[in-house]
Image: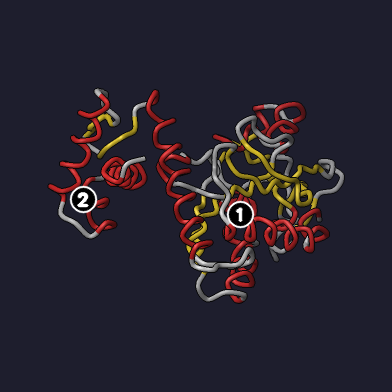
């Protein structure tokens, strides 16, 4: 790739990842006119638009996402070349690694794990992206995905580090009312069990967050199917072993099939898998 082509492409990549010309300009240390000039140069040279301009910013066109994915791979490869050329060793941990996971794992499990990984290298930065939905990997450029699922998505590659357990929890004054699941949680192992075993007229308030469901259950709003590492630690909740079985789901540490894995990403993914496996008993409940 010629230098001028890569120079344009890195501006395109910055806009794709931030969704904004102004934010891209801040990231690159230039003014917004410079960013617009490079965007126009790239689009004019290739004869195609890359973005849809919306009131909320710049959105990558669906049939152009492969361009951004290739640009991300090129950026990762260039960083890896620079690291190796500078004498970096395989285990060097330097740079930024972005991890996306559920709100429960980001709140209760991953902070102490990422802190322990960070303690091994002061040059490593990590970003935790909390979301119960499938993250937009183009926009957020997440490197590693930590998510419970019965099977891994076709566009992901990874390992099941351990299993997460799920059970029913409520206050001691449980009256056979259940809290419902909404959004992405309906596709979880908990959502599948509830759809097959709890009738709609037994359900009250619903939520797309296990943390919110735990708070509702603690207020006496009904019973909730929760990850055991959430329910077991809640002082106001008891496990209802006779009301629901102990469910389990693999916990995956994965990355997108097209992501170029740099040394820091491989190291962090390996440590995440190992440290989650070390907590298998508490996570399974």
Q: Quadrant of residue 279?
A: bottom right
**Relative to residue 273, is residue 258 depicted above or below?**
above
Residue nearest the observer in this picture, 121 or 54 = 121
Q: Residues within 10 Å of mark 1 (few under 14, many from 20)?
A: many
Mark 2 to mark 1 CA distance (whole Å): 33 Å
Residue nearest the observer in this picture, 12 or 194 = 12
In screen coordinates, is 46 left or right of 206? left
Q: Which quadrant would the N terminus be assigned to in this image?
A: top left
Q: Which secondary structure, mark 1? A: helix
List x then y, in percent, for residue 157. Answer: 66, 39
**Relative to residue 79, is residue 196 depicted above or below?**
above
List x then y, in percent, for residue 236. Answer: 69, 62
* Numbered tag placed on residue 60 in the rendering: none
* Numbered tag placed on residue 104 in the rendering: 1
Residue shown at the point (73%, 53%) measured from the top left? 173
Q: Earlier in the sequence, mark 2 or mark 1?
A: 2
Please name the residue that numbered disc 2 is placed on: 22
List x then y, in percent, for residue 238. Answer: 77, 57
Residue nearest the observer in this picture, 154 or 2 = 2
Q: Residues within 10 Å of mark 2 (few under 14, many from 20)?
A: some
Q: Residue furthest left?
A: 33
Residue shown at the point (75%, 60%) measured from the top left? 274
């Amino acid at each position: 790739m010629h230098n001028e082509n890569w120079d344009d492409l890195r501006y395109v990549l910055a806009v794709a990842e931030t969704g904004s010309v102004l934010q891209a300009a801040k990231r690159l240390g230039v003014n917004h006119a410079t960013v617009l000039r490079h965007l126009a140069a790239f689009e004019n040279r290739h004869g195609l638009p890359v973005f849809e301009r919306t009131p909320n910013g710049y959105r990558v066109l669906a049939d152009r996402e492969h361009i951004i994915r290739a640009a991300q791979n090129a950026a990762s490869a260039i960083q890896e070349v620079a690291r190796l050329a500078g004498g970096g060793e395989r285990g060097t941990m330097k740079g930024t690694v972005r991890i996306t996971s559920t709100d429960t794992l980001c709140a209760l499990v991953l902070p102490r794990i990422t802190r322990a990984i960070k303690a091994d290298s002061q040059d490593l930065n990590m970003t935790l992206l909390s979301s119960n939905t499938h993250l937009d990997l183009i926009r957020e450029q997440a490197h590693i995905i930590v998510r419970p699922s019965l099977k891994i998505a076709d566009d992901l590659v990874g390992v099941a580090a351990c299993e997460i357990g799920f059970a029913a929890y409520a206050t001691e004054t449980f009256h056979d009312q259940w809290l419902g699941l909404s959004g992405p949680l309906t596709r979880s192992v908990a959502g599948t069990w509830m759809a097959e075993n709890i009738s709609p007229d037994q359900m009250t308030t619903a939520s797309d967050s296990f943390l919110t469901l735990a708070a509702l259950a603690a207020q006496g709003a009904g019973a909730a199917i929760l990850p055991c590492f959430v329910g077991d630690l809640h002082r106001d909740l008891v496990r209802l072993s006779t009301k629901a079985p102990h469910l389990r789901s693999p916990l995956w540490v994965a990355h997108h099939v097209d992501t170029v894995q740099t040394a820091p990403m491989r190291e962090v993914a390996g440590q995440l898998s190992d440290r989650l496996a070390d907590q298998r008993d508490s996570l399974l409940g």
